[in-house]
Amino acid sequence: EVQLLESGGGLVQPGGSLTLSCAASGFTFSNDAMAWVRQAPGKGLEWVSTISSIANRPYYSDAVKGRFTISRDNSRKTVFLHMASLRADDTAMYYCARDPRAGDLDYWGQGTLVTVSS
Amino acid sequence: DIQMTQSPSSLSASVGDRVTITCRASQSIGNWMAWYQQKPGKAPKLLIHKASTLESGVPSRFSGSGSGTEFSLTINSLQPDDFATYYCQQFYSFSQRTFGQGTKVEI
């Protein structure tokens, strides 16, 4: 059974940083790209970042480019999202998802909440 | 950037109704379209990928169609479990994975 478990969310001050983790199990982690998607309270889904399975190439939305860094550790079956220079509009539930076919996201974690506030 | 326009933003329907949700892309995206269902407090669930391929385990009353810039999700014979919010997503390129604004299907 595929499982994705996010952790690392919490309350952080504007300008601060936070690193999210997503531990995967139930599939060959190194074969698949992985993505982060966020959802602000009461709002729609927003793609944040994807890291490819080959060459670990990262991709970012314009909203987070230059502030967020995605990475993965295939030996630990874990994908990370390091978030810096956080702003109030980064407040959201952050979901980790598997990207098996270069785009669609077939398995999702339960999400971890990030709140940026002073 | 590729923009997605999803409509309607909400709709009211009854059990047994046929419901259609549409998504329009600002440029051609081939068939690189997916549809998701999300219930309150839950993660999204993949319904359709490659515009019309039903994800394993998804009921056959769900179907997707379209290519290029115009896409639709149809739910035949709406069931009580189908009341949720639905999102389209384009993935034409690795650097752009835009979601539509969502459609809330209410009773």
Image: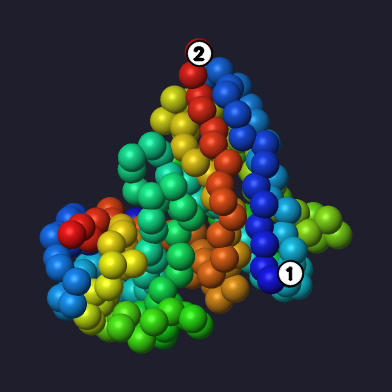
In the current view of this chain or complex, which residue is farthest to the right? A75
Left or right of A83, for residue A118: left
Residue A72 visible to an observer of this rendering: no
Q: Amino acid at mark 1?
A: Gly
Residue shown at 31% from the left, 59% from the top: B84
Instruction: Say which residue label 1 marks.
Output: A26
Quadrant in which residue B82 is drawn? bottom left
Query: Helix, strand, or loop for circle 1?
Result: loop
Image x and y of residue B103, in percent: 24, 58
Q: CA distance from mark 1 to mark 2?
A: 39 Å
Chain of the residue that carries numbered disc 2 in the rendered image: A
Mark nearest the camera among 1 and 2 is 1
Q: Amino acid at mark 2?
A: Ser
Query: Helix, strand, or loop for circle 2?
Result: loop
Residue A102 visible to an observer of this rendering: yes
The quadrant in which the N terminus of chain A is found is: bottom right
Residue shown at 38% from the left, 37% from the top: A41
